[in-house]
Amino acid sequence: MYKGIIFDLDGTLVDSLDDLTSSLNVAMAKAGLAPRSRDEVRLMIGNGMTLLVRRAIQGHAVSTEMADRVKESLEADYNLHCIDRTRPYAGIDGLLAQLRRAGTRIAVLSNKPDAFAASIVAALFPERPFALVRGQLPGGPTKPDPRAALEILGAWGLDAAEAAIVGDSAVDIETARNAGMAALGAAWGFRDRLELESAGATAVFDSPGELTDWLAALGRTTLG
């Protein structure tokens, strides 16, 4: 059993696709740009707000200043609406409860700006099960850079071999591999099993319940 598990947020713990798509399209409309579909936005999420905007405006003749305004509008609208329809995936509460019972340390590491990550976790997980919640800090690294993940392990006093990262995209799998940690793929999220397996996931799961059962079996094997 792992002593520590770091979770991605969007597409792993919570389904935030509707709110992100809505806020992005509010920003696109203000700039006079065509909206992006939910399925398009699904594939744009994962590397932070700046890259989300760059991907959304790709193909448009947009200046740097306009791109910056789109990002500002996106963040302003999202600040007001980030939990309108965002909810934990079915089975996440059971997964987290099992990890707490097992004494496993758990944290959140997101490429979402830190303030958004903190507010979403506080609103949707009011019992505050996570020891640490870390989003992107100004000037700080973003996944797949492993530094933030390794800082979390350092705060826990754990080695990389004692921990895992759970995430729904190649970015999360690459982060885990770069940190020397196990990489557990969340195929219930925004990307598919093929992306996770191609990125080198240690194991891939179709639902939080499946991951819960796998971790329970792993714990019995480790203890036995």
Image (tube, rainbow, N blue to C red):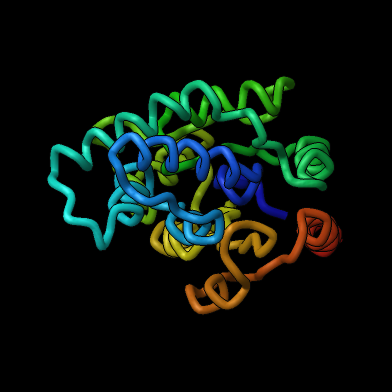
Decide which of 203, 69 is in the foreground and name it.
69
Quarter of the view holding residue 95: top right
Instruction: Give x and y (percent) for residue 120.
Output: 58, 28
Whether residue 7 is visible here, answered yes or no, is no
Instruction: Give x and y (percent) for residue 31.
Output: 28, 39
Q: Residue at x 40, y 39 (%)?
A: 151
Q: Residue at x 62, y 47 (%)?
A: 5
Q: How many marks?
A: 0
Whether residue 191 is visible here, answered yes or no, is yes
Vertical relation: 156 (above or below) 180: above
Q: Is residue 137 left or right of residue 191?
A: left
Q: Residue at x 53, y 44 (%)?
A: 158
Decide which of 183, 65 is in the foreground and name it.
65
Decide which of 24, 144 is in the foreground and name it.
24
Please state, as top left, top right, bottom left or bottom right, where the C terminus lies in the image.
bottom right
Vertical relation: 50 (above or below) 121: below
Instruction: Give x and y (percent) for residue 153.
Output: 48, 42
Quarter of the view holding residue 108: top right
Q: Residue at x 14, y 37 (%)?
A: 65
Instruction: Give x and y (percent) for residue 24.
Output: 43, 41
Please state, as top left, top right, bottom left or bottom right, where the N terminus lies in the image.
bottom right
Q: Is residue 149 left or right of residue 87?
A: left
